[in-house]
Image: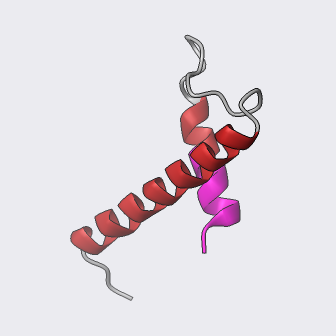
Amino acid sequence: MAQSLDAFIAELRGDVERFEQAYRTRMAEKPDQYPVTLPDGQEGLWFEFFMDFVTNHAI
């Protein structure tokens, strides 16, 4: 099925917003397990967290 660039970007933005909402909810519940800042050299974990969310939790 064909998909435009605009549709792809809209879908990706939605995924990012859902990830942020879910992460912030978990962060409020378990702040010691869901940091708001990652240490130097560990920034790539944000992408891993996001990909795990999209792969395992996206509707």
Pick the residue in front: 14 or 5: 14
Image quarter where the N terminus lies is: bottom left
Percent across and percent down for residue 24 are: 58, 44
Image quarter where the C terminus lies is: bottom right
Total labels: the figure holds 0
* 3 on left or right of 17: left
Residue at (51, 49) in percent of width and height: 20
Pick the residue in front: 3 or 24: 24
Percent across and percent down for residue 4 are: 25, 76
* 22 on left or right of 29: left
Residue at (56, 35) in percent of width and height: 46
Name the quadrant containing residue 36.
Answer: top right
**Residue 47 vertical placement versus 37 (above, below):** below
Percent across and percent down for residue 38 are: 59, 21
Q: Residue furthest top?
A: 40
Principal secondary structure, stretch drawn in magenta: helix
Q: Residue furthest front?
A: 28
Residue at (61, 46) in percent of width and height: 23
Residue at (45, 54) in percent of width and height: 16
**Residue 42 vertical placement versus 29 (above, below):** above
Residue 25 part of the magenta segment: no
Percent across and percent down for residue 13 are: 37, 59
User: In the image, which residues are magenta?
Assistant: 50-59
Pick the residue in front: 38 or 3: 38
**Residue 58 vertical placement versus 1 (above, below):** above
